[in-house]
Amino acid sequence: MNNLIPIQHHDNGVQAVMGRDLHAFLEVGAEYRHWFPRMVAYGFEEVKDYAVKNDRVQDSLGRQREALNHVISLDMAKEISMIQRTDKGKQARQYFIECEKRAKASPFDPATLTRAEILQIALNAEEERLALEAKNKELEPKAEAYDTFLDASGKYSVGAVAKMLGKGQNWLFRELRNRGVLITKGAMRNTPYSQYMHHFEVLPHNYERKDGTQGTSYTTYVQPSGIDFIRKKLGLQTIDPLPTSYAA
C-alpha cells in the first residue's frame, strides 16, 4: 500500500492525518482556511474529531510565518473524503480504511480463515460503508444550508448567524457584549476584543457627517469558525442552519 497521505501514530494508539496533507491530496479548489471550516460544519467537533495546530512555514521570500493546520482523526478524514464525491476522495477513503485494518490486524495466516469468517469480514466492511453514507446524507443538508448564509468572501453577517441560532440580530449583539466578546462602548462598539478577533472580521466604512467632516463606522462579520465559538459561548446546544422561515 503506497503512503498516499502521511499517517501519524499517537501514543494512545490513535491514527491521524494533517488537514493540509489531506486538502492537498484531495486537490480541493478552495483555500484551506476556507475549506476546513466548511468541512467542520458537517458536524465535527474540536477535541473529539480534530485539534488545531499551527505550523511554521517559509514563504517565497524565505520568511517564517505561521500557517493554520489541524490534526484530524482517521474517522473524520474518511468522512471528509467521501463528502468530496471525487475519485481522489474515494481513493483517500479506501486508503484510510486500509491503514485502520493494518493497525488493528494481528498477524495471521489468511489460509486459516473459514468461508464464514471471510464473508463476515466483507459484511462488516459493507455495513461500515453504508453507515458512513447514511451519516453523510443526514449531515449534507446542514452543511449546504450553512453555505446559503455565506457571503461572496466566505464569511457570515451577524444577522445571518442570529438566524441560524433562531434569535434576532439585536439579541445576539447584546449577548456577545454581555459576555465580553464584543466591545460595549465607543466608536468600536459591537466589534470583537482582540483575543476573539480570529473568529470575526471587521470592515471599516468611511462616511461624511452632516457638518462635512469624515467619520468611520465598523461592520462585524463572523468567520466560519466563529459559528461554533458563538454557540458554545452562549451555552446553546444546537444550531439550526436553515430556520423554517428560510426553508424553500
Image (cartoon, rainbow, N blue to C red):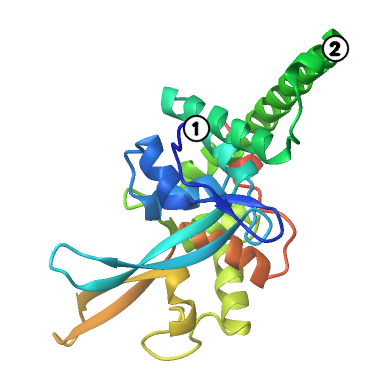
Quadrant in the picture for residue 33: bottom left
Residue plotted at (59% across, 69% down): 172
Could you say where residue 239 lies in the image, as x and y percent from the top left?
66, 53
Residue plotted at (36% across, 38% down): 28
- Can residue 141 be seen? no
> Looking at the picture, which amino acid does disc 1 mark?
Ala
Q: Residues within 10 Å of mark 2 (few under 14, many from 20)?
A: few
In this image, 38 relative to 13: left or right?
left
Q: Secondary structure at mark 1?
A: helix
- Can residue 227 be seen? yes
Tell us which disc is closer to us: 2 or 1: 2
Counting residues from the N terminus, which is met first, the one under dot 2 or under dot 1? 1
Q: Secondary structure at mark 2?
A: loop
Q: Residue furthest bottom?
A: 186
Could you say where residue 13 lies in the image, as x and y percent from the top left?
70, 53
> Looking at the picture, which amino acid does disc 2 mark?
Thr
Q: Residue furthest top?
A: 115
Against 50, is 214 above or below? below
Q: Which residue is mark 2?
A: 114
Q: Which residue is mark 1?
A: 92
